[in-house]
Amino acid sequence: VRRAGGHARWVRDADTGNSDHREFQLEGLPAAKLGQPDNPCRHEPCDRPSLLEPGTFPLVRRAVERLLRAL
């Protein structure tokens, strides 16, 4: 992610099953969840498109492209 121009931190999944990445991991497949774990509105009624940070979309795309090329 740094090479794509950003930063990331690893956060252990809470085993809540709130995303499909958990199911991939349970089957032994590589998976990751990109998001804002500290956002109190994430997946809540107060969540709104206006809370998204448009500048992060190109960063995530670059990071995923680099990861896929490395595989």
Image (cartoon, rainbow, N blue to C red):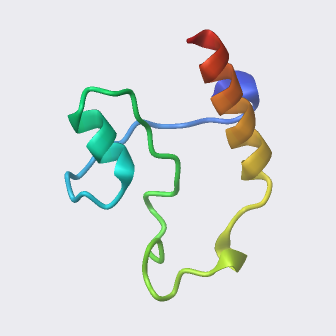
Residue appearing at x 19%, y 51% in the figure? 15
Q: Is residue 37 above or below residue 65?
A: below
User: In terms of image quadrants, where is residue 58?
Assistant: top right
- The residue lying at 23 percent from left, 52 percent from top is 14
Give the image location of residue 70, x and y in percent: 61, 11
Q: Residue at x 60, y 21 (%)?
A: 67
Of residues 13 and 6, the one drawn nearer to the viewer in this rendering: 13
Q: Position of residue 38 (x, y in %)?
A: 44, 61
Give the residue furthest to the top: 70
Identify the image quadrant of the N terminus: top right
Q: Report if residue 12 is visible in the image.
A: no
Q: Is residue 63 left or right of residue 54?
A: left
Q: Is residue 32 visible?
A: yes
User: Which residue is located at x 66 percent, y 26 percent?
Assistant: 2
Q: Left or right: where does residue 33 sit relative to residue 64?
A: left
Left or right relative to 42: residue 69: right
Query: Residue 46: x and y, percent?
Result: 51, 87
* Residue at the farthest front position: 27
